[in-house]
Amino acid sequence: MDSWVHNEYAIPLTTAFTTIVVVVAFLFEEMHEPRVSRSQQPSLFRDLTRKRHMENILIGGQDYCVSYLRMDVGSFMHLSSIIRDRHLLVDSRHVSIEEQVAIFLYIVGHNTKNRTMRIEFLQSGETISRYFNNVLRAICTLSDDFVQPPSGICHLEIQANPNWYPHFKDCVGLLDGTHVDVSVPTLELPHFRGQKGPMQNVLAVVNPDLRFTYVLAGKYYLVDAGYTTMNGFIAPYQGV
Ligand SMILES: *[C@@H]1O[C@H](CO)[C@@H](O)[C@H](O)[C@H]1NC(C)=O
């Protein structure tokens, strides 16, 4: 009987002892491991997880990409390749240009907080902020390519549509404005006062095939036709 009882406890005790030895050994190693380098080194696991995250966005189907980046896969790859070809951004050791652009698009497309981004893209807040600003600067330098003033010739979409032609032959664009929520330092708040908190006034004009021909973000004066449209002054479009 005695030996039976002894045997019954012998196995769990050995297991418990082994566990304790392993835990102590682990803690000991942790204490002697240079902590800083361990937490600062991007781990292989995180790199792989991020790579898989990007793959999911790009091959998860058109719906998924549009919902996630607010842009289809083709447009996303095209935008990234323009940025790459013009050397506006560079791949970093751990973050490709595509991932940097995705970080930017996810933030502007969903108004995502820094904290959420850290979890979503497994990057530190500083890294997210740095890439966001880099991509923002890159996109701003492309504004002249994407926003082209109207040619002055009646647009083909209008010419080809008997409902529109000739009534709208002088139409140079379709104009609308919107308010975009902003976060700004307290000192600047008076410049961004809106009905529901701080916001930025944005005015945009598109041509009939929905390409931007003019965008103005900020404050502007509505002026009469004696003025030309320039930064801060919106003049009526001739003949509209
Ligand atoms: C994001 O968080 C980091 C700290 O984790 C901070 O340095 C950075 O300024 C934050 N960026 C924004 C836009 O709040």
Image (cartoon, rainbow, N blue to C red):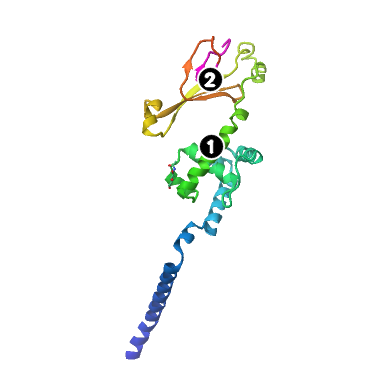
- The question of residue 235 being in magenta is answered with yes
Mark 1 crowdedness (10 Å alpha carbons): few <14, some 14-19, many ≥20: some
| Amino acid type at mark 1 | Leu
Q: Position of residue 34 (x, y in %)?
A: 46, 64
Amino acid at dot 2: Leu
Question: Does ligand 1 reach within 8 Å of label 1's beta carbon?
Answer: no
Task: Give the x, y percent position of residue 21.
Answer: 41, 76
Q: Which residue is rendered at x = 57% and y = 37% of the image?
A: 138
Which label number is shown at residue 136?
A: 1
Rendered-image quarter of ligand 1: top left
Q: Secondary structure at mark 2?
A: strand
The reply to whether residue 1 is in sight is: no
- Residue 29: x, y in percent? 44, 70
- Residue 197 among those drawn in magenta: no
Residue range corresponding to the magenta coloring: 229-240
Q: Residue furthest left?
A: 2
Quadrant of image for the N terminus: bottom left
Label at residue 175: 2
Magenta span: chief secondary structure: loop
